[in-house]
Amino acid sequence: DPGPDGMTALFYQRFWDLTGPDLVKVVQNFHSSASFDERLNETNICLIPKIDRPRRMAEFRPISLCNVSYKVISKVLSSRLKKILPDLISETQSAFVAGRLITDNILVAQENFHALRTNPACRKKFMAIKTDMSKAYGRVEWSFLRALMLKMGFAQKWVDLIMFCVSSVSYKVLLNGAPRGFIKPTRGIRQGYPLRPNS
């Protein structure tokens, strides 16, 4: 589906001779200046019902509809980041890296609980704690994200590129097909964001 500018990926592909040079220029300018016209990062949120006759917001799945030009910029960054993720993410982390599955954690958890139940030495020394990080990406503080990337050794230029992408977003919610309202977040990483590891 198209973003707020109404242009689809197919439009850019079909009319590449006309659109390509301008799109390439937008990407190159972003990489040299670490900024772009924030209208490129305007995003429509479409609410898809998870069930028949939803009554609460939790019964909808928000889908972010971004402009294609923004998707291209973030895809370039994402592709570069994916090359170094295996070196950055611990071997014990079972997601976000090719060849690792988050479902592997189910087996590890089952083995640990079995050991806790059956090994007498574990009964009085260990406990299990379940935490739910529901909507965790929506709570990420941007200042923390910036500080973390710098602490991990990313170049200031790279951090500036990422942070501009993260912080320049604005939202409108599609109601009956028409964009309504204006939301300018101060934290969080949106659902469907190309730089999110699971996107």
Image: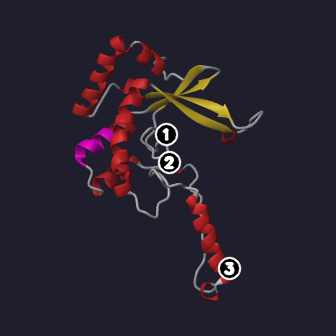
**What is the C-alpha distance between the residues marked 1 and 2?**
7 Å
Image: magenta residue range = 155-163
- Residue extending farthest to the right is 53
Q: Name the quadrant of the N terminus.
A: top right
Across and down, in percent, residue 41 comes to 41, 29
Query: In terms of secondary structure, where does tag 1 sit?
Result: loop
Q: How is the image coloured?
A: secondary structure
Crowd class of label 3 (few under 14; some 14 to 19; many from 20; radius 10 Å): few
Q: Which residue is mark 2?
A: 137
Q: Is residue 117 left or right of residue 191?
A: right
Across and down, in percent, residue 56 comes to 71, 39
Q: Is residue 70 placed above or below 57 in the rendered structure?
A: above
Crowd class of label 2 (few under 14; some 14 to 19; many from 20; radius 10 Å): some
Crowd class of label 1 (few under 14; some 14 to 19; many from 20; radius 10 Å): many
Q: Is residue 160 magenta?
A: yes
Q: Which residue is mark 1?
A: 190
